[in-house]
Amino acid sequence: MAWNKSLSAAALRPLLLLLALCVALPSCKISYKFNGSALDYTVYKTIRVAQFPIRAALVYPPLQQMFENELLDYISRNTRLQTTEGAADLELEGEITNYALTPQAVTENAFASQTRLTISVRVKYVDNKDDKKSNDQTFSAYRDFDASLMLTDVQDGLCEEICEELVNLIFNATLGDW
C-alpha cells in the first residue's frame, strides 16, 4: 500500500491549525450556561424558599414535600445561592392551588379514554435588591394517563413529572429572568 503524502498533509492541516490556536490562545474560553440563570452573584447571595401548602379542593398529601424538595434541589443544582430561613436577597413563597382530575378524549360510548391530572402553583417571587423584578403568578402543568388505570397506581410518577415541569417554569420566570 503506497503512502499518499498530499492526502495525509491535507488531513493534518486542520489538526495543526487547531493545535496552534490552542497554544496561541490559552486564555480564551467559550462558555455556555443552558439553565438560564441570570443572577449576578456579586449582588445576590441568599434565597429563602418558604413552604408551599396545598390549598386545592382535592389534596394529595405527599405533593407538598415532593414539590418543595424538587424546587430546593433545582435551585441548589443550578445556582450558587445559599438557602436561608431568615432575611434573604430573594424570596420564593406560594401555595399549591389546584390538583384536579378531568376526563379527556371521550369515546363513542361517552366514557373518557384519558384522564388529565393538572397541578397549579401560585408563586410570589420577591427580589429584595430590585423590586421591579418581583412578581406574583400562577404556573400550571398536566399529564394525561389512560382512564383504565387507577390514579393511585400512577399518581406518584405523574406528580414527580409535573413537579419537575413546574419547577422548570418557575425557575425560568424568576431566577432565570426569561
Image: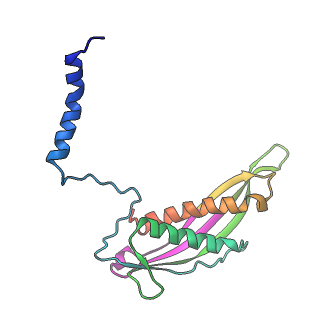
Give the residue at the far right of this rendering. 109
Residue at 17% x, 42% y is 21
Q: Residue furthest top?
A: 1
In which image quadrant can residue 156 be found? bottom right
Nearer to the camera, 103 or 79: 79
8, above or below 168, in the image: above
In the rendered image, the quadrant that contains the C terminus is: bottom left
Up the image or down, 43 lies above or below 33; here it is below
Q: Is residue 92 left or right of residue 66?
A: left
Residue at image point 63% right, 62% down: 160
View extreme (left): residue: 24
Query: Magenta stretch?
Result: 118-140
Q: Which of 81 and 159 is in front in this view?
A: 81
The x, y position of residue 38, in whole percent, is: 35, 65
Q: Is the magenta stretch mostly helix, strand or loop?
A: strand
Seen in the image, is 79 located left or right of residue 73? left
| Left or right: 22, with 176 as reference point | left
Which residue is at 34% across, 76% downward?
Answer: 44
In the image, is 156 to the left or to the right of 141? right
Where does residue 162 sit, x and y in percent of width and height? 61, 61
Q: Where is residue 62 in the image (x, y as percent from the top left)?
A: 68, 72
For image coordinates 20% across by 23% down, the residue present is 9
In magenta segment, residue 124: yes
Quadrant where the N terminus sits is top left
Q: Count the numbered circles shown.
A: 0
Q: Which of 98 and 13 is in front in this view?
A: 13
Please indicate, yes or no, whether residue 131 appears anywhere in the rendered image.
Answer: yes
